Image (cartoon, rainbow, N blue to C red):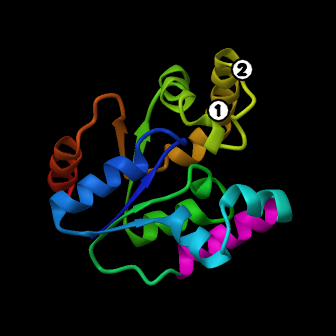
Amino acid sequence: MKIFLIGFMGCGKSTLGRKLATKLGYDFIDLDQQIEKQIGMSIGAYFAANGEAAFRAFERKTLQEFNYPSNCVVATGGGAPCYFDNMEWINNNGTSVYIEMSATALARRLENGKDKRPLLKDMNPEEMIHFIEHKLEERNPFYLQASLKVNGISLTPDDLRALLLSDV
């Protein structure tokens, strides 16, 4: 089974995904890390040098052409499901899980590491919440197409594993 974790940055896709993969005995793939390996630079640097359109095209190609193992947990980038036909492709090729959280909870999680996130680094907490609310409004039509929607607050790998196995 291929499990694609989707949701806004900071919702726990990578952290939860890695732990879930271990619990299931699956491989773990972080799509952003795969992209960085292929382009030889950080996503932020690629964005700055080539723009968002070039990044989204490369992200789509990586998502759809990656050689996934038959059993894996994939942490997508926060925007990946929202461009081209990516969400449709994800749903046709595995089980998608939207890790849903409020803008305030996401902002709290992102506050400490915002220097590593080019879109957030210069924002104060209030600006960050407003930005996240706006982005969630744009992205939720895509995120809500997920096979499974879960509340990310206090979600454990065991909880997610149980939900996935009961859903199969």
Secondary structure at badge 2 equals: helix
Secondary structure at badge 1 equals: helix
Residue 99, position as x, y percentages in the image: 41, 41
Residue 45 vs residue 6: left or right?
right
Residue extent of the magenta highlight: 52-65
Q: In which quarter of the view is residue 8 placed?
A: top right
Residue 19 vs residue 74: left or right?
left
Residue 85, position as x, y percentages in the image: 63, 65
Q: Decide which of 42, 3 is in the foreground and name it.
A: 42
Tag 1 residue: 137
Tag 2 residue: 127
Give, as a three-letter code, the residue at label 2: Glu
Against 123, residue 54 (above or below) is: below
Q: In which quarter of the view is residue 44 placed?
A: bottom right
Q: Decide which of 41, 84 is in the foreground and name it.
A: 41
Query: Which image quarter holds the N terminus?
Result: bottom left
Residue 42, position as x, y percentages in the image: 66, 61
Give, as a three-letter code, the residue at label 1: Glu
Residue plotted at (23% across, 39% down) = 156
